[in-house]
Image (tube, rainbow, N blue to C red):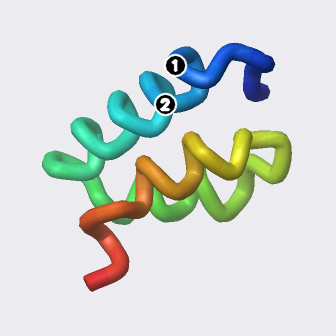
Amino acid sequence: MGSKEFFINKAIGWALRQYARTDPKAVKKFVKETKELHPLSRREAMKHLED
């Protein structure tokens, strides 16, 4: 998972971050278990979960 395209990776992170508003545990688990997730997507997804 991941792309050479910056905005595709960013959008994946945005979508995961949006989903984290309703199910943060699922997003944390997905990010942790999906090793092929692009670092940018991972960072965006976890942005507000690491407080």
| Amino acid type, label 2 | Lys
Within 10 Å of disc 1 (Cα), the crowding (few <14, some 14-19, many 20+) is few
- Front in this rendered view, residue 1 or 47: 47
Residue occupying the point 66% across, 63% down: 32
The disc placed on residue 49 is none
Image x and y of residue 21, in percent: 16, 50
Residue positioned most to the front? 6
Q: Is residue 31 above or below residue 41?
A: below
Residue positioned most to the bottom? 51
Residue occupying the point 23% across, 38% down: 18
Q: Is residue 51 above or below residue 8?
A: below
The disc placed on residue 10 is 2
| Amino acid type, label 1 | Phe
Q: Which residue is mark 1?
A: 7
Image x and y of residue 19, in percent: 27, 39
- Disc 2 is placed on an element classified as helix
Image x and y of residue 15, in percent: 35, 29
Q: Are marks 1 and 2 in contact (CB under 8 Å)?
A: yes
Compute the Cα span from label 1 to label 2: 5 Å
Q: Would you say 44 lies left or right of 51 here?
A: right
Q: How many marks?
A: 2
